[in-house]
Image: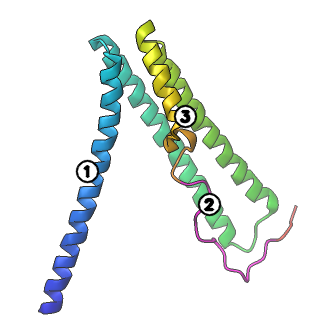
Amino acid sequence: MRKLSILIVTFSLILTSFITTSAKGLKHNFDKRGKIIKQLNLTDKQLEKFNNIRLNQEEVKIEIESKLKKNKLALKRLLLNDDFTKQEILQLTDNASKLHAELKKSKTETWFDIYNILDDNQKQVWKKHFTAMLEHGNKNFRKPGNKRMGMNDKPYFNNSQKFRNNN
């Protein structure tokens, strides 16, 4: 009975910690977006366009990140087999690079789409915001996705497996 109560208390603490951390992250993202919107002093029409552009960007981001995850999974599957070639691995790596580039391009296009709905004073504020993101190292802008394919992960194969150069 005592073990059960300790387990329940531990689980409750972990769950509470997780919920609190998630809520802080959401609040932080909203505060950042709300701050720039307040600084821009958007009209209702501009705000509607701004939100539509951001939602479209989010949809594109989700699609590309999904493709990146599928590509990473394909690489994992490939490396778990004994039958793979250098060309297959290079193809998956090239595909991941193209997807990362596509995501960066999409973010830049979004920035310009928003820039084009602003008046001259708002454009100056928006450019300062963009410059600050670059200077202060906004990780989400500089590095799409949370991880690069294969980096910071445990190896997909053990040390006894060897790469073969099968062209």
Among the two numbered marks 1 and 3 on one chain, the one whose residue lies closer to the N terminus: 1
- Nearer-N-terminus badge (2/3): 3
Disc 1 is placed on an element classified as helix
The reply, left or right, for residue 137 in relation to residue 81 is left
Could you tell me residue 162's position as x and y percent? 78, 76
Q: Which residues are magenta?
A: 147-163
Q: Which residue is mark 2?
A: 151
Confirm whether the magenta stretch covers residue 159. Answer: yes
- How far is disc 1 from disc 3 in space, using C-alphas? 26 Å
What residue appears at the point 66 percent right and 75 percent down from the top-left corner?
Answer: 157
Residue 105's quadrant in the figure? top right
Return the x and y of residue 116 as percentages of the image width and height. 48, 12
> How many C-alpha atoms fall within 10 Å of the one at disc 3: few (<14), some, or many (≥20)?
few
Q: CA distance from mark 2 to mark 1?
A: 28 Å
Q: Residue at x 21, y 64 (%)?
A: 16
Mark 2 and mark 3: span between their CA atoms?
A: 23 Å
Query: Residue 47 versus residue 130: which sits nearer the camera?
Result: 130
For this view, does 128 lie left or right of residue 71?
left
The residue that mark 1 highlights is 23
Q: Secondary structure at mark 2?
A: loop
Dominant secondary structure, magenta: loop
Earlier residue among tags 2 and 1: 1
- Mark 2 surroundings: few (<14), some (14-19) or many (≥20) residues within 10 A: few
The answer to whether the residue labelled 2 contacts the one labelled 1, judged by CB atoms less than 8 Å apart, is: no
The amino acid type, in three-letter code, at marker 3 is Leu
